[in-house]
Image (cartoon, grey):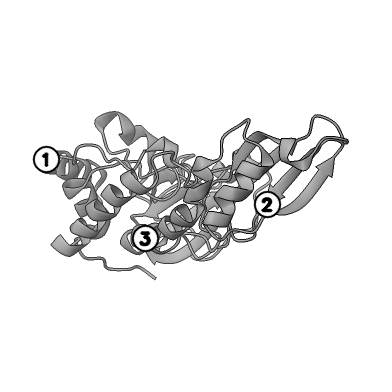
């Protein structure tokens, strides 16, 4: 069902900028999944005349929440690799926006891309604009024409998945994930910033004990083994000079820092 959206409010805009500013300080090493693509930064807002020109030439009205995001914030930081926009003159040939988006529920996988596009009037996906790369082979689309206009869809493995949510609902879920999940995880994992390659096991244990962290061995292969901590997103790979050496002489070989991702899915679809 088509969804009527509203322009972002001043509070919405403040929520965006405050969260991105917080993340630039909390995640300088860009450990949230795909944050390296945007570094929590946005580009310049899109001029009103550019947005109006695009709407006039395509004959569609952009969803109000996405339109105001582009006009007041600008493309850049967003779920996964960020929010894209393709509304310049050169982008018009990418679209068939005069025809409606053909799906109202998840599709079965197409045999291949050629089989899919053969179904479309002009050989292009109608009624939707790509708004972001979501990792792996997943892309996000915003429907701008058709029964599900105003909602975001995911495309992966020749399959379209409906989210049932608007652009702002999708984007604000990401902001909430950053504040409520990513920041606490980064803060909890901060002691491991002190662990350096070449440190002895005794030094590593001292750092962990000071923060109330209990290490446990989770893997061993010859003279190498891995120390992990339940609830943390770092592993420490250790190596010993020989099996006869004292445990304190074991050294840190590498520190594995895992990325932080929204396991619940930004779309409400696990992993997407």
Which numbered circle lies on residue 179?
3
Dot 2 falls on a residue whose secondary structure is: strand
Dot 3 falls on a residue whose secondary structure is: helix
The Cα atoms of the two marked residues, 1 and 2, are separated by 54 Å
Mark 1 touching mark 2, by CB under 8 A? no
Placement of 151 over or under 97, stated as above or below:
below
Which numbered circle lies on residue 49?
1
Q: Is residue 216 left or right of residue 113?
A: right
Residue 158 can be seen, yes or no: no
* Other-residue count near label 2 (Cα within 10 Å), few / some / many at <14 / 14–19 / ≥20: some
Which quadrant of the structure image shows residue 50?
top left
* Other-residue count near label 3 (Cα within 10 Å), few / some / many at <14 / 14–19 / ≥20: some
The quarter of the picture where the N terminus appears is: bottom left
Provide the residue designation for mark 2. Answer: 228
From the top left corner, tell me how far across and down residue 251 is, in percent: 69, 34
Q: Of circles 1 and 2, which is in front?
A: 2
Dot 1 falls on a residue whose secondary structure is: helix
Residue nearest the viewer, comparing 140 with 102: 140
From the top left corner, tell me how far across and down residue 189 is, in percent: 51, 52
Q: Residue at x 48, y 57 (%)?
A: 188
Q: Earlier in the sequence, mark 3 or mark 2?
A: 3
């Amino acid at each position: 069902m088509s969804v009527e959206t509203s322009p972002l409010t001043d509070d919405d805009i403040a929520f965006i900028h405050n969260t991105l500013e917080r993340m630039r300080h909390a995640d300088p090493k860009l450990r949230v999944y795909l944050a390296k693509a945007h570094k929590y930064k946005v580009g310049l807002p899109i001029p009103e005349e550019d947005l109006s020109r695009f709407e006039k030439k395509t004959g569609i009205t952009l969803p109000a929440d996405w339109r105001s995001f582009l006009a007041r914030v600008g493309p850049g930081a967003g779920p996964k690799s960020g929010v894209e926009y393709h509304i310049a003159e050169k982008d018009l040939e990418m679209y068939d926006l005069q025809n409606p988006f053909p799906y109202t529920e998840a599709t079965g996988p197409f045999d291949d891309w050629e089989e899919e596009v053969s179904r479309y009037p002009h050989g292009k996906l109608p009624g939707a604009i790509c708004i972001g790369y979501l990792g792996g082979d997943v892309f996000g689309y915003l429907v701008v024409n058709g029964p599900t206009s105003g909602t975001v869809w995911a495309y992966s493995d020749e399959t379209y998945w409906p989210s049932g949510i608007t652009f702002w609902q999708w984007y604000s879920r990401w902001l909430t994930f950053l504040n409520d999940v990513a920041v606490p995880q980064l803060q909890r994992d901060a002691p491991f910033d002190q662990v350096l390659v070449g440190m002895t096991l005794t030094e590593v244990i001292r750092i962990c004990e000071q923060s109330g962290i209990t290490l446990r061995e989770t893997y061993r292969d010859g003279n190498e083994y891995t120390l992990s901590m339940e609830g943390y997103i770092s592993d420490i790979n250790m190596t010993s000079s020989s099996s006869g050496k004292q445990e304190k002489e074991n050294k840190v070989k590498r520190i594995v820092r895992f990325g932080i991702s929204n396991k619940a899915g930004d779309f409400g679809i696990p992993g997407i």
